[in-house]
Image: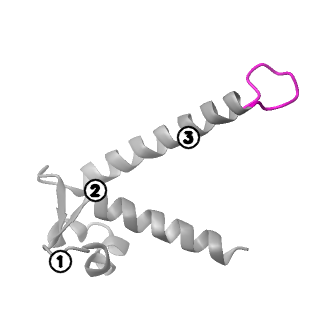
């Protein structure tokens, strides 16, 4: 993070590091979603979810609008909620 090696991390350096991290996470998420979305329609069906046991197990919880498929938005929101819950439980 200390890109200029001055022994401290500026707001600019911190922001740049966090942006790079979030961009990497977003890219990894998109790739993983694409792998699960075998037919490429932009959604994960119940059948497609079977390749990931955890996704298959929680499919009904993630499919918030109950349309029988999981969108990127639904999956992303579920992951964020789980991360926030984990943070709360570590305090």
- Residue 9: image quadrant is top right
**How is this picture coloured?**
one colour
Residues in magenta, as a range: 1-10
Task: Work out how far the residue at label 1 is from the one at label 2, CA to CA, in angstroms.
Answer: 14 Å
Residue 23 location, x and y as percent? 47, 38
Q: From this viewpoint, which residue is outermost toward the right?
A: 7
Q: Quadrant of residue 61?
A: bottom left
Which structural element holds mark 2? helix
Above or below, comparing residue 70 to residue 41 in the picture: below
Mark 1 or mark 3, earlier in chain:
3
Q: Quadrant of the C terminus?
A: bottom right
Q: Which residue is mark 3?
A: 21
Tell me what residue is drawn at x 76 percent, y 30 percent.
10
Tell me the crowding category of disc 2: few under 14, some 14 to 19, or many 20 or more residues within 10 angstroms, Cα based.
Answer: some
Percent x, y for residue 58?
33, 79
Local crowd size for mark 1, using a 10 Å CA cut-off: few (<14), some (14–19), many (≥20): few
Q: Point out the tag, 1 or 2, that comes first from the N-terminus.
A: 1
Q: Which residue is mark 2?
A: 72
Q: Name above or below for residue 4 compared with residue 35.
A: above
Residues at marks 1 and 3, CA–CA distance in whole angstroms: 32 Å
Say which residue appears at 49% left-offset and 71% top-offset.
Answer: 82
Name which residue lies at 54% across and 36% down. 19
**Residue 50 or 63: which is nearer the viewer?**
63
Q: Residue furthest top?
A: 4
Say which element carries label 3.
helix
Locate residue 7, reporting x and y percent: 88, 28
The answer for how far apart the CA atoms under marks 2 and 3 are is 19 Å
Residue under circle 1? 66
- Horizontal arrangement in the rendering, residue 10 relative to residue 66 (left or right): right
Mark 1: which secondary structure? Answer: loop
**Of residues 23 and 56, the one drawn nearer to the viewer in this rendering:** 23
Q: Residue 8: say if magenta.
A: yes
């Amino acid at each position: 993070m200390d890109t200029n090696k001055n022994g401290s991390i500026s707001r600019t350096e911190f922001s740049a590091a966090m942006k790079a991290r979030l961009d990497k996470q977003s890219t990894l998420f998109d790739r993983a979603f694409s792998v699960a979305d075998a037919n490429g329609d932009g959604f994960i069906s119940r059948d497609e979810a079977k390749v990931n046991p955890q996704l298959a197990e929680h499919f009904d919880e993630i499919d918030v609008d109950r349309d029988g498929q999981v969108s990127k938005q639904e999956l992303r929101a579920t992951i964020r909620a789980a991360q926030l819950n984990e943070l709360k439980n570590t305090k």
